[in-house]
């Protein structure tokens, strides 16, 4: 039974988030009124996930992320961002938070993001022992416009990253989020040519249009091409769609706190924060994600132990 700790000094916002999560089947939801209260709650019962506000008394969201990452490294955190908290949120993502959701989009996006992050975290924790040595590993996939295939591939590549010892378990979770965002961008914005502005205006209409176009030509004939190359030095993930592309030079800087709430910047922000390098081709229909390999000690036990 998954458990989530919701942290927010605003009773109204906390109640909204708790109410949304309590609608999920078999979820246990705990509450904390600020960062210090959250640390006290963590000593009483360890949740599978923490959802936290950024601006709070006693201990803010950035400080809470640092404390949880140091003392509870296997617990992922999702940030709830609002106007005035953008700069802290960018820093928190850089320090280890797994994802974020704007407060104004809680009703439409919170449960989806929680489910995605929690699923990834649980899968990472349950992996078998890592490979002891690797010289080179290459994979290549061609996907139809099918969300179930996209999510399955993101999970597979996250598991591969763990087995290939590319990074720690927590970092592999974040790597998986970045890959997932690249695949979803190729699906929605590349092959199906659906603007983020539609999602901003009507979340339901956005997904409804995606369902319609995924079975209509010319969108249904397009494919997503993914290649992976893992060496002792790095892992390189190429995601290419068959859409018309775009001009990468016009992309806003997603690390600028002023752009945190923009509908088109979420995926790019997470990719650039969680990967070592992100670059697009000139046509704008291929993104290359690079993760520099992080040396780590040999594992003596299973992956559910607390070491990283």
Image (spheres, rainbow, N blue to C red):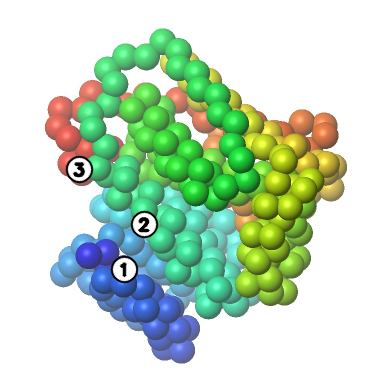
Which comes sooner in the sequence, label 2 or label 1?
Answer: 1
Q: CA distance from mark 2 to mark 3?
A: 15 Å
Where the C terminus falls, by quadrant?
A: top left
Q: Which residue is mark 2?
A: 118
Q: Which residue is mark 1?
A: 4
| Circles 2 and 3: CB atoms closer than 8 Å | no
| Circles 3 and 1: CB atoms closer than 8 Å | no
199 over 195 or under it: above or below: below
Instruction: Give the residue at x 78% y 42%.
Output: 243
Indicate which label's residue lies in the foreground, 2 or 3: 2
Where the N terminus falls, by quadrant?
A: bottom left
Q: CA distance from mark 2 to mark 1?
A: 9 Å
Q: Quadrant of residue 78?
A: bottom left
Instruction: Give the residue at x 63% y 72%.
Output: 204
Q: For the image shown, how many numbered marks are present on the structure? A: 3
Q: Nearer the viewer, residue 268 or 187?
A: 187
Residue 106 on image: x %, y %: 53, 75
Q: CA distance from mark 3 to mark 1?
A: 19 Å
Instruction: Give the residue at x 26% y 52%.
Output: 71
Q: Nearer the viewer, residue 86 or 49?
A: 49
Residue 102, disc: none
Q: Which residue is mark 3?
A: 304
Instruction: Give the residue at x 83% y 41%.
Output: 244
Which comes sooner in the sequence, label 2 or label 3?
Answer: 2
Using the rendered image of the protein, determine whether residue 124 is visible from the camera's viewpoint: yes
Using the rendered image of the protein, determine whether residue 248 is visible from the camera's viewpoint: no
Indicate which label's residue lies in the foreground, 2 or 1: 2
Q: Tag 2, which secondary structure?
A: helix
Q: Tag 1, which secondary structure?
A: strand
Which comes sooner in the sequence, label 3 or label 1?
Answer: 1
């Amino acid at each position: 039974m998954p458990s989530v700790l919701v942290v927010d000094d605003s009773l109204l916002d906390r109640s909204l988030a708790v109410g949304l999560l309590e609608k999920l089947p078999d979820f246990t939801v705990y509450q904390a009124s600020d960062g210090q209260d959250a640390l006290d709650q963590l000593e009483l019962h360890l949740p599978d996930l923490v959802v936290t506000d950024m601006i709070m008394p006693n201990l803010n969201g950035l400080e809470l992320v640092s404390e949880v990452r140091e003392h509870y490294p296997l617990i992922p955190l999702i940030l709830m961002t609002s106007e005035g908290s953008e700069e802290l949120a960018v820093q928190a993502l850089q320090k280890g938070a797994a994802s974020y959701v704007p407060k104004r989009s809680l009703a439409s996006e919170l449960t989806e993001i929680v489910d995605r992050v929690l699923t990834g975290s649980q899968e990472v924790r349950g992996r078998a022992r890592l490979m002891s040595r690797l010289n080179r590993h290459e994979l290549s996939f061609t996907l139809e416009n099918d969300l179930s295939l996209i999510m399955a591939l993101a999970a597979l590549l996250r598991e591969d990253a763990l087995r290939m010892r590319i990074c720690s378990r927590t970092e592999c979770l974040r790597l998986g989020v970045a890959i997932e965002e690249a695949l979803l961008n190729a699906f929605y914005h590349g092959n199906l040519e659906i603007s983020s502005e539609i999602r901003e205006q009507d979340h339901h209409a956005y997904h409804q249009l995606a369902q319609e176009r995924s079975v209509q030509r010319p969108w249904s004939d397009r494919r997503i091409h993914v290649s992976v190359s893992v060496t002792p030095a790095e892992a390189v993930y190429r995601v290419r769609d068959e859409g018309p592309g775009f001009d990468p030079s016009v992309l806003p800087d997603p690390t600028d706190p002023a752009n945190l709430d923009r509908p088109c910047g979420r995926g790019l922000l997470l990719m650039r924060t969680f990967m070592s390098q992100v670059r697009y081709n000139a046509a704008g229909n291929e993104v290359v994600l690079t993760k520099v390999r992080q040396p780590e000690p040999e594992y003596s036990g299973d992956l559910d132990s607390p070491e990283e």
